[in-house]
């Protein structure tokens, strides 16, 4: 800590000297992601590397057409992935906002505005209500100062601050310190800068994000496992076939080309591009639904989430204190409406009531709005509050009771709130003389009251009445409400000073940061999908439990951060198996909770908007930040940014993620079933010893052009019925399971066998004709079999034959391309085909129909068995 050289603040020379020593007041930024790094990232998957190697071998052997075709697919995959990820990166940059662009300091003997980044240790900073704290400060003076620290702690109620006894506040005395990134809710203060940039508490917590381990997504794991299996199989089988062929007397070049064709046939060249395009289209759809995926796999991973760990303040709640209940000795009232919009009503058991209709309620509301520094104003974007959230809630309450704000000219004096009295008083001139209006903590207000106003009129405040009042506020506090007591007393006309004694007690107001209206339904939707929701907040256990109760979020007990720190890993693991919420947590607590859940093989999503959430956001399998209220650190640590800060968007993203994974499974099965037929036909033909049934260019045509486009359309299938009623998939669930493997083998045996039969039936009429017919048959087989993969459970008649019009367009277009391949001379030359007659088409058509009819019958029988 540096002391100022003089009470007039630092001099310009001293500022420059200290800046040379300490640097700028900015958080250490990660090196910006290079566009080249984003592009290079698209070429690191095993499947893409296999394709690159295959293209290199083809080029080495002089098969330029094959090499170019494979290279184009690799390039397409890279460009698509790059465009989406770079768009997300630049969108995040656009969301960035400066923490506090300007601030006021005393330098060279005068107060002046400066850029916050120019602050140095020892600067004297001036703070007023509404200001952001630009650095860590030791408070020198503080008048009625309350600071909103929710961005750091998650605590929704502003914290009272006081001046330190010395010029520098002790590091462990948080009541005399103000922290970078927080905001002044009420009051005025001056403070000396004690730390800047990365040395601040804000910077220290932001630095924890570097400790979080970046985990691969479930889709990356699944695709990677499948790619390795396919790669090993393709290379092994292709090499074995080439060696066996050479040993049996075939020409080495012919066998190398055969092996290459076999490897190309086994690897679904279109898979990387189809996965990328499908995820990119899904990410674009989510942007329209107000969710920005910073990584293509983010939404798909969210679909696998089994646990959502969510912050409370501003995520589940509105981050706007709201009065919900009023109690007076004469009766109680419920208050409708949320936030600072005064459109709600105050309702008694007999119906809506205004201050003019109920003198005691009117007196309470008058004191609430007079003993107050907050302002609630209507702007073009709605109602906006300036000041302390609690005071803003009291102003809104008074406006709901049709009580107008006092004329500022009638305010004669004030006794500011302090931590010892826990009261605030304002002297105002009323129609019948001066009035001392008082508000504060119930116990502290009650101790200076000697009377109360009941239904019978003014009465002495006896033991029975005090007990009644205590029971009322204890009941409200037990429900998670913050309770404010109000009282008043008469003063001499024109008095500017008065003692807080012999007051008349008016009543109690219960306030809470209310849940967002859409959150209850979102939580119900998540639970219906088998996803557990755990609240982790910096607020009190009572408040957290009350909010959980309002949201129908199961919570048998709340564990505080202090209790959590004393728990062993085994005890925490046991606690997490029950219905638990966490309160008064620190950033390290959140990371520990996430890691414990991950150790139980859970896929964990973490939501949050404060810098205190950033480490856990990065540690989680899927981090979700708030785009509007979220700090820059939280956005940078997250995988998904909710552009509308709406918790309900998460459920829509989960639905989209599940749809994406289902569709990935569908087109993986489809592509591999298509490739299986080609591989079986090539291997069987090799054993028979006949001429090549498919040329390498024809295999690429099938895999890249016709299959790839059809698979992309398959990836656009709508969500299946009951998708959000299924439990989350297992973290280790493979993309291709045993049922899928059996399915693709059956399809492969049929399509490969049928192609071979056509080839050898027509071979006496000419090798080119037979190869053209087998090639065309395989294309039509693959287009027809796509209907069997449109649903993982239901037949097409149930999901609708025409429910995916893009798939029908893709099929018709690809059949049209195949017609061009056998009738258009340029493609005839490229693919070495010749025209087919009507008889050939009839043969192919007869063998195609079973691929549509048989799977539909099997799916229908399975559906009826499940229904039974």
Image: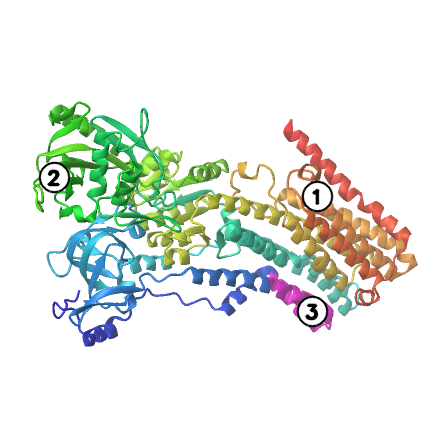
Colour basis: rainbow
Quarter of the C terminus within the rendering: top right
Range covered by the magenta-colored residues:
48-77
Residue at screen point 49% across, 35% down:
528
Residue at screen point 25% across, 57% down:
179
Q: What kind of element bears circle 2? A: strand
Disc 2 target residue:
433
Residue 99, position as x, y percentages in the image: 33, 61
Disc 3 target residue:
68
Within-10-Å neighbours for mark 2: few <14, some 14–19, many 20+: few
Above or below, comparing residue 824 to residue 864 in the picture? below
- Is residue 60 rendered magenta in the image? yes
- Give the spatial CA distance, label 3 vs label 2: 93 Å
Q: Is residue 737 left or right of residue 264?
A: left
Residue 114, position as x, y percentages in the image: 26, 68
Q: Nearer the viewer, mark 1 or mark 2?
A: 2
Q: Earlier in the sequence, mark 3 or mark 1?
A: 3
Residue 511, position as x, y percentages in the image: 28, 38
Above or below, comparing residue 101 to residue 845 in the picture? below
Can the viewer see residue 218? no
Above or below, comparing residue 682 to residue 545 in the picture? below
Within-10-Å neighbours for mark 3: few <14, some 14–19, many 20+: some
Q: What kind of element bears circle 1? A: loop
């Amino acid at each position: 800590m540096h002391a100022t050289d003089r009470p007039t603040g630092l001099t310009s020379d001293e500022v420059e000297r200290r800046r040379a020593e300490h640097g700028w007041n900015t958080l250490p930024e990660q090196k910006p992601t290079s566009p080249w790094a984003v592009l290079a990232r698209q070429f690191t998957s095993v499947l893409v590397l296999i394709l690159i190697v295959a293209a290199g071998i083809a080029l080495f052997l002089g098969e330029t057409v094959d090499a170019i075709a494979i290279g184009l697919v690799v390039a397409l995959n890279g460009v698509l992935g790059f465009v989406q990820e770079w768009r997300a990166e630049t969108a995040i940059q656009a969301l960035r906002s400066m923490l506090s662009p300007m601030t006021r300091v005393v330098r060279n003997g005068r107060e002046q505005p400066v850029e916050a980044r120019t602050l140095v240790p020892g600067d004297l900073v001036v703070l007023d209500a509404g200001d952001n704290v630009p650095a860590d400060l030791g408070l020198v003076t503080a008048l009625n100062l309350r600071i909103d620290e929710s961005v750091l702690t998650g605590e929704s109620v502003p914290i009272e601050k006081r001046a330190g006894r010395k010029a520098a506040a002790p590091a462990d005395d948080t009541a005399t310190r103000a922290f970078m990134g927080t905001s002044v809710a009420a009051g005025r203060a001056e403070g000396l800068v004690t730390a800047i940039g990365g040395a601040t508490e804000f910077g220290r917590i932001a630095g924890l994000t570097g400790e979080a381990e970046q985990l691969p997504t479930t889709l990356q794991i699944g695709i990677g496992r499948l790619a390795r299996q396919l790669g090993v199989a393709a290379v092994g089988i292709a090499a074995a076939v080439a060696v066996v062929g050479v040993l049996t007397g075939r020409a080495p070049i012919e066998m190398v080309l055969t092996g290459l064709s076999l490897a190309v046939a086994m690897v679904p060249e279109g898979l990387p591009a189809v996965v990328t395009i499908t995820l990119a289209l899904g990410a674009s759809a989510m942007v329209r639904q107000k969710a920005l995926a910073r990584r293509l796999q983010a939404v798909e991973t969210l679909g696998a989430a089994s646990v959502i760990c969510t912050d409370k303040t501003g995520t589940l709640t509105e981050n706007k204190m709201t009065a919900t209940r009023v109690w007076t000795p004469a009766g109680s009232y419920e208050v409708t409406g949320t936030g600072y919009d005064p459109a709600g009503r105050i309702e008694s058991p007999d119906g809506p009531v205004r201050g003019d209709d109920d003198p005691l309620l009117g007196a309470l509301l008058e004191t609430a709005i007079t003993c107050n520094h907050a302002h609630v104003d209507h702007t073009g974007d709605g109602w906006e509050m300036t000041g302390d959230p609690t005071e803003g809630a009291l102003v809104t309450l008074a406006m709901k009771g049709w009580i107008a704000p006092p004329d500022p000219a009638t305010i004669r004096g004030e006794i500011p709130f302090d931590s010892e009295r826990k009261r605030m008083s304002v002297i105002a001139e009323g129609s019948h003389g001066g009035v001392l209006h008082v508000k504060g903590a119930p116990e502290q207000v009650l101790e200076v009251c000697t009377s109360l106003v009941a239904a019978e009129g003014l009465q002495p405040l006896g033991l029975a009445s005090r007990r009644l009042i205590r029971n009322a506020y204890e009941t409200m506090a037990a429900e998670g409400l913050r309770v404010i007591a109000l009282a008043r007393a008469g003063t001499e006309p024109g008095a500017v000073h008065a003692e807080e004694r012999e007051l008349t007690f008016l009543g109690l107001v219960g306030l809470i940061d209310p849940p967002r209206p859409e959150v209850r339904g979102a939580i119900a939707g998540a639970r219906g999908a088998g996803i557990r929701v755990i609240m982790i907040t910096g607020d009190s256990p009572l408040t957290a439990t009350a909010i959980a109760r309002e949201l129908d979020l199961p919570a048998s007990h709340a564990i505080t951060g202090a209790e959590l720190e004393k728990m062993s890993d085994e005890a925490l693991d046991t606690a997490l198996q029950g219905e638990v919420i966490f309160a008064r947590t620190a950033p390290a607590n959140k990371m520990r909770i996430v890691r414990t859940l991950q150790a139980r093989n859970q896929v964990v999503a973490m939501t949050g908007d404060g810098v205190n959430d950033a480490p856990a956001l990065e540690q989680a399998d899927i981090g979700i930040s708030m785009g509007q209220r979220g700090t820059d650190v939280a956005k940078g640590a997250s995988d998904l940014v909710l552009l509308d800060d709406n918790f309900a968007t998460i459920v829509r993203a989960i639905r989209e993620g599940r749809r994406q994974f289902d569709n990935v499974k569908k087109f993986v099965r489809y592509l591999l079933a298509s490739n299986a037929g080609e591989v079986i036909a090539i291997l069987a033909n090799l054993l028979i010893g006949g001429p090549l049934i498919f040329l390498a260019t024809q295999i690429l045509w099938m895999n890249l052009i016709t299959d790839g486009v059809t698979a992309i359309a398959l990836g656009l299938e709508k969500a299946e019925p009951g998708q959000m009623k299924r439990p989350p998939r297992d973290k280790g669930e493979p993309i291709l399971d045993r049922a899928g493997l059996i399915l693709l083998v059956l399809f492969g045996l049929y399509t490969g066998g049928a192609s071979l039969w056509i080839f050898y039936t027509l071979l006496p009429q000419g090798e080119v004709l037979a190869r053209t017919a087998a090639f065309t048959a395989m294309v039509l087989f693959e287009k027809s079999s796509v209907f069997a993969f449109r649903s993982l459970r239901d037949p097409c008649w149930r999901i609708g034959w025409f429910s995916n019009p893009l798939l029908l367009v893709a099929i018709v277009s690809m059949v049209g391309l195949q017609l061009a391949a056998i009738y258009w001379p340029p493609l005839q030359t490229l693919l070495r085909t010749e025209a087919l007659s009507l008889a050939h088409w009839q043969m192919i058509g007869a063998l195609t129909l079973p691929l549509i009819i048989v799977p539909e019958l099997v799916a229908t029988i399975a559906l009826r068995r499940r229904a039974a």
